[in-house]
Image: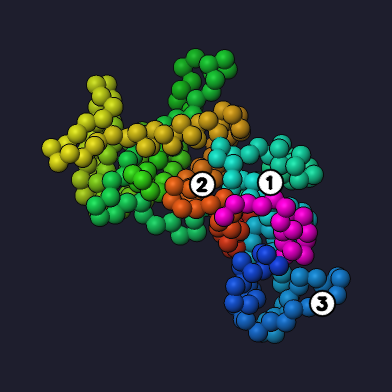
Amino acid sequence: MTCDLTNPIFTDEAAATAHLEAGRWPNGAACPLCGSDNVTKMGGKTQAGMFQCNGCRDKFTVRTGTIWERSHIPLHKWVLASHLMASSKKGIPAHQLHRMLGITYKSAWFMAHRIREAMAPATPERIGGPAKIVEVDETELAPSRKTRKPKARANNKKFVALVERGGRVRSKMLTGAEGPIGNGVRRVLALNLHPESAMHTDGAPFYKFAGVSASHEAVNHDKQFMRMTPDRIKVHTNSAEGYFSLFKRGLVGTYQHMSEQHLHRYLAEFDFRMNNRARLGVSDAERASRILKGAGGKRLTYHQPN
């Protein structure tokens, strides 16, 4: 199923509202404030798309409790932006969204971050499992040779990726507050790697004593890119490095800059598209539909509460 940009959900507000209501409440509307399904759809021009809950007596719309709440941008533009971000393998810049949607750059930038929030899993499962190989590798985002300062490598942004061979991806940012990079990597592995996985890494010493997987194999990149075990299992981190390459092409060619404050959201964006890629049987339209379904319960404001 391909994404048909002539679909009314991208241009008509009533069609977009009905599309989002059907996706959020396939069995009929339910109050997001109290959970009651005893609701009444209201009418009239001023109350279009609004429901009255007969339980808590409050009013709500499909926007309530989602990334679209209190946004003045029409829902059909939210739907189009979600489809554009879902189908752009290396991302789409806020300036392009601002031109295509006819909204300000500031609104497009904030809209894109809200959509990235919808892409992040609400309750992420651990990567890997029995009989699964998980490649683990870390990388850093360095400035261009033209602008980088001498001896400033310690300030580079770093993240680690866990890549299920042929399956899912999980990326996590590493912060300098954790001390040596190995401390941050071990924390990420303890929280995100399934303990029954087979872990494949490079020769970095901090993986050797991580103790978070059923087995550990390493390849020495000073001598080889891949080696074969006696059981004829290929040991490499090529899948993780391929993911890094895609992410950095998106950074260099699309976004140019990612601040440390928002890096985790960009990682969630690239993880989402990789975890819902065509090779796993997910079309552009289905990928966009999953973004819209993930919009609930993730309201994002300019000033996040403490």
Of pointers 3 and 2, the one earlier in the residue sequence: 3
Residue 73 percent across, percent down from the top left: 77, 54
Residue 134 visible at all: yes
Of pointers 1 and 3, the one earlier in the residue sequence: 3
First to last magenta residue range: 1-17
- Which residue is the site of mark 2? 273
Q: Is residue 124 left or right of residue 1?
A: left
Q: Residue at x 50, y 53 (%)?
A: 282
- Which residue is the site of mark 1? 110
Compare residues 119 and 275 and report the one nearer the observer: 275
Seen from this angle, which residue lies furthest right?
Answer: 45
Q: CA distance from mark 3 to mark 2?
A: 38 Å
Quadrant containing the N terminus in the rendered view = bottom right
Disc 1 on helix, strand or loop? helix
Residue 41 percent across, percent down from the top left: 74, 78
Quadrant containing the C terminus in the rendered view = bottom right
Q: Is residue 306 left or right of residue 39?
A: left
Question: How crowded is the residue under tag 3: few (<14 C-alpha within 10 Å), some, or many (20+)?
Answer: few
Q: CA distance from mark 1 to mark 3?
A: 31 Å
- Which residue is the site of mark 3? 43
- The three-letter amino acid code for the residue at tag 2 is Arg
Q: Is residue 276 left or right of residue 42?
A: left
Q: Is residue 4 shown in magenta?
A: yes
Disc 3 on helix, strand or loop? loop
Residue 117 visible at all: no
Disc 2 on helix, strand or loop? helix
Question: How crowded is the residue under tag 1: few (<14 C-alpha within 10 Å), some, or many (20+)?
Answer: some
- The three-letter amino acid code for the residue at tag 3 is Gly
Q: Is residue 269 shown in magenta?
A: no
What's the mark number on residue 94? none
Q: Nearer the viewer, mark 1 or mark 3?
A: 3
Residue 222 percent across, percent down from the top left: 27, 21
